[in-house]
Amino acid sequence: MVWQQHRIIRLNIVVLLYLMVCFVLCPVSAMTVSSPAEVHSVRGDAVTLTCTFTSTSRATSRMSVDWSYRPQTGGPPQAFFHFSSLAFPPQDGQFNGRVKWLGSPARGEASIQLLNASLSDNGTYTCSVRNPPDVHGSPTSQTVLTVTPKVPAVRFSDVAVLLAFILLPSTIIVLALLGRMCCSPKDKSQAKGYHSPIEVTPEEEPGFKQINRKEKNMTCCDLYLLVWPFFFCS
């Protein structure tokens, strides 16, 4: 009985030592694939779908990359790009001629570029990387792409022309109105009125003290009478 117990103990020790040796000398291979959770783009632009991976094994000819797409409206994923030593872009469908390979397996990159993004490209993109003998870990990663319409850009010249057509007439009208409000009818009649040769003006009356022209300031009425003919008589 005691002999059997010693035998079981020795067997457990051997198994434990074996597991320790395997854990130190033969680590389990693992792969990690990562990509941004969300990517935003504008319709017509080129958008980069980034995908990177880490592996304990060096990338060889057996390494492969697959990209799939699931529409925003739902449905099963649709594979549209494959890489295995060479890039195999899509030959038909909505991505035909619009996918460019940007990856570099030696640097752990498996990114692609989507040209001329459209609103129908909105959806979830999945990057899958396989690099045997790595069989554990997370070999896939997903990115949600959102494409929005392009907002028309307003050029400075357009704004300048628009402001000129709006502000210039408005400024002329405001100046005219201010002039009419500031200049009284009496001032207008005195400025425009015709004097008879026999009519006695205030300057000719006895005891009238003439005001020095240099000391007389230009009034609002004078400014209005000076400027308004250019606007309304041209």
Image (tube, rainbow, N blue to C red):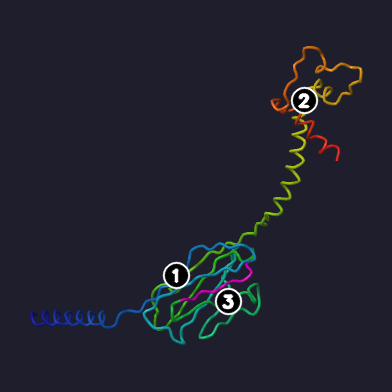
Q: Can you name the residue that lies furthest to the bottom here?
A: 61
Q: Which of 169 and 141 is in front in this view?
A: 169
Q: How many marks?
A: 3
Residue density around tag 2, few if under 14, some if 14–19, many if 20 or more, within 10 Å: some
Residue 204 screen position, x and y as percent: 82, 17
Q: How crowded is mark 3: few (under 14 residues within 10 Å), some or many (20 or more)?
A: some
User: In which image quadrant can residue 229 be found?
Assistant: top right
Q: Would you say the magenta stretch is mainly helix, strand or loop?
A: loop
Q: Which mark is residue 48?
A: none
3 or 2: tag closer to the N-terminus: 3
Mark 1 vs 3, N-terminal side: 1
Q: How far apart are marks 3 and 2 (CA)?
A: 74 Å
Which residues lie in the magenta part? 109-117
User: What's under tag 2, amino acid-wise?
Assistant: Cys
Q: Where is residue 153 in the image (x, y as percent from the top left)?
A: 66, 57
Compute the Cα span from label 1 to label 3. Answer: 19 Å
Identify the residue under disc 3. 100
Tell me the number on the disc at residue 34. 1
Q: Per the image, is 228 magenta?
A: no
- Disc 1 residue type (three-letter): Ser
